[in-house]
Image: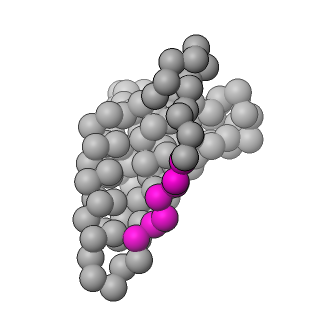
Amino acid sequence: MKFEISDWVQAKTRNGEFVHGFIESFDESQQIAKLFVVRSDNEQSVGHSTTALVHWLRRLPEMPLDEPNAIQNMIDIALATRDEAWFAELSERLATATDQPGKEALPKPHIDFPIANRIRHQV
């Protein structure tokens, strides 16, 4: 099976961890993929990169991005991975998905008080 950078996969790592994530890079000569981990049975691996042999990878099914809730889930992942371009793309897609006739807009939070961040600057 041929994999490409950005494919979503599940894998078993050399350390025996079971991970879900996406492919960041390949070393084709050694048949090793570098993965960014978004879910793992070892919580310390989440948000970090790891490697796995290509024959230990299993492609995850593609998720359709036409439902607002699915798009919001992907936005959470874009934020976790600090992928600004993907976040912008998904935010635009979310705006158009909720603007379609027959689609119910997601509720927007209503805040009646000023919000201060952790160093007490108002946002």
Magenta stretch, main secondary structure, is loop
Residue found 58% across the figure and 14% down from its top: 119
Residue 72 visible? The answer is: yes
**Above or below 79: residue 63:** below
**Above or below 74: residue 42:** above
Residue found 34% across the figure and 42% down from its top: 87
Residue found 42% across the figure and 41% down from its top: 78
Residue 37, position in %: x, y? 55, 36
Residue 19, position in %: x, y? 62, 42
Please tell me which residue lies in front, 54 or 113.
113
Residue found 56% across the figure and 26% down from its top: 116
Residue 123 counted in the magenta span: no
User: Which residues are the magenta region?
Assistant: 105-111
Residue 109 counted in the magenta span: yes
Residue 28, position in %: x, y? 35, 32
Residue 103, position in %: x, y? 36, 79
Residue 34 visible? The answer is: no
